[in-house]
Every structure is written in structure tokens, then in C-alpha cells.
């Protein structure tokens, strides 16, 4: 059942933080009012970059009680689901374009007890995800090309958000609609106006020393915009 209106939730992306001082990065974002943390896992195959594995997720889990949104930019994510769930992931996000069977992998995520997420590359039509929505707890529209942090926002993500919001609301599905990538305060406002309920924010949070203030600025940018979420 879909819950009542809720404010837009903010998830700082730890890919943009100082890996040598993640505890401080987490603490500062919490002080600013972050709602969750986003962790990008890259395998060097699905995207041309390598980041980290379950051990770092577990380290972050020990530093926060906020939900951990783990984004698996991985060619074959299914063998790793249990390990990331055991490390503390609350949501496991796979890509529509990965090599594993999507319906079976989404079911496997839920079988671990985690929320299931589905991300869409910028070049993929958003309608390709609609048949899978009943298996999805979080639909993630990419606002940049996956693989590297600090990219500029691709405005074609906005109509994808609007189309997703219309489909989710038409079907009364309890799905979090996320935007990942290039989220400045201005983009945050536009994304929320186009239906996003969950924003992944990297450089806009960790790009300056005032992490808590940056989170508050993003919160102010989305103030007053409400959508029905789970």
C-alpha cells in the first residue's frame, strides 16, 4: 500500500568522499540531515572502473544506522547479493542492462531480505523497466553515465523521471523513484518537481568541506515538494 506524502530523501554518495576518512564523511552528512548513504560498487567490466566490495560496506555499516543503498554496477551481480546483504546493505540496486536474468535477480535480492532496486543507463528507454516494476522497490534513473563520479547532469533524465512517476502513480505502486548523478541543488529541485523521491548526491555533498551545510542546501532546494512513497 502506498503511504502518504513524504519529503524527498537525500543519499550522499560515498564515492565522492575521502576514503581515508569515511567515518568523518558519514558523521558530517548525518549532521546535515542525510536520509541514507549510497555506495557504488564497480567491477571493471560493466563499467570501466573498480571501486570496492563488501568489506567497505561493512565498515560504513558500523558507522551509521541510516539505510545503505548499494548500487551494483556489476556485469553479474547475482553471486554477490548475499555478501553485500550480510555486509549491511538495505537496498541492492542492479542494472537493467546487466548480464544476469533481471526478474530472477530481483527475486533473489528480495529473498535476502533487502529491498530490490533497478537502475537504468541514460541510453536505455525508461519504458523497458515498466514491466518489472512489481518486483522493484526502488527505480533509479541515471543522470550521468555510470562508472565515474563528478559528471555533469544529463537533462534527458528529467522526462524519464516524469514518465516513471506517471507509471508508478497510475499503478499505485509503492516504489521509491531515484535520480543518481549530477545532482546539484538546482537539479535536485527539478528532479523533485519531475517526480523523484530519492536523490543520490555526490560532489554536491562532498565537493567542499562544509558537508553538513551542503546537505542542508539540497534539503532547502527540495523543500515543499511531496510525493507518495512507500
Image (spheres, rainbow, N blue to C red):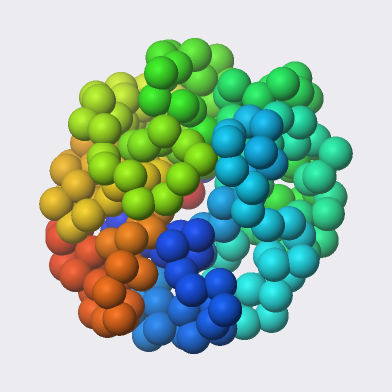
Tell me how many marks there are: 0
Q: Is residue 116 above or below residue 168?
A: below
Q: Is residue 97 above or below residue 193?
A: above
Say if residue 80 shows up in the picture: yes
- Residue plotted at (64% across, 73% down): 60
- Residue plotted at (75% across, 23% down): 100
Looking at the picture, how far across and down is residue 58, in whole percent?
73, 70
Residue 11, quarter of picture: bottom left
Q: Is residue 206 above or below residue 222?
A: below
- Residue plotted at (81% across, 45% down): 80
Looking at the picture, how far across and down is residue 155, in whole percent?
21, 31
Please state if 117 lies on the left or on the right of 128 as rendered. Answer: right
Residue 154, quarter of picture: top left
The front one of 70 and 192 is: 70
- Residue plotted at (72% across, 21% down): 99
Say if residue 72 shows up in the picture: no
Please state if 6 lies on the left or on the right of 137 as rendered. Answer: left
The front one of 123 and 84 is: 123
Q: Is residue 94 above or below residue 204?
A: above
Looking at the picture, how far across and down is residue 177, in whole percent?
41, 40
Amino acid at each position: 500500500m502506498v503511504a502518504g506524502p513524504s519529503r524527498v530523501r537525500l543519499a550522499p554518495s560515498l564515492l565522492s568522499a575521502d576514503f581515508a576518512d569515511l567515518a568523518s564523511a558519514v558523521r558530517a552528512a548525518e549532521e546535515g540531515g542525510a536520509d541514507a548513504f549510497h555506495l557504488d560498487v564497480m567491477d571493471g567490466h560493466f563499467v570501466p572502473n573498480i571501486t570496492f566490495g563488501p568489506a567497505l560496506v561493512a565498515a560504513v555499516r558500523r558507522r551509521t544506522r541510516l539505510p545503505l543503498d548499494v548500487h551494483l554496477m556489476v556485469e553479474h551481480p547475482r553471486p554477490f547479493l548475499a555478501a553485500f546483504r550480510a555486509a549491511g546493505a538495505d537496498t541492492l540496486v542492479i542494472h537493467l542492462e546487466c548480464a544476469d536474468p533481471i526478474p530472477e535477480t530481483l527475486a533473489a535480492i528480495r529473498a535476502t531480505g533487502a529491498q530490490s532496486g533497478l537502475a537504468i543507463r541514460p541510453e536505455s528507454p525508461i519504458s523497458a523497466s515498466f514491466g518489472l516494476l512489481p518486483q522493484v522497490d526502488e527505480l533509479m534513473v541515471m543522470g550521468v553515465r555510470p562508472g565515474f563520479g563528478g559528471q555533469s547532469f544529463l537533462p534527458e533524465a528529467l522526462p524519464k523521471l516524469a514518465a516513471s512517476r506517471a507509471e508508478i502513480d497510475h499503478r499505485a505502486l509503492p516504489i521509491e523513484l531515484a535520480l543518481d548523478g549530477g545532482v546539484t541543488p538546482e537539479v535536485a529541485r527539478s528532479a523533485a518537481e519531475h517526480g523523484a523521491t530519492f536523490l543520490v548526491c555526490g560532489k554536491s555533498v562532498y565537493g567542499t568541506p562544509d558537508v553538513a551545510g551542503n546537505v542542508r542546501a539540497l534539503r532547502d532546494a527540495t523543500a515543499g515538494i511531496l510525493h507518495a512513497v512507500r
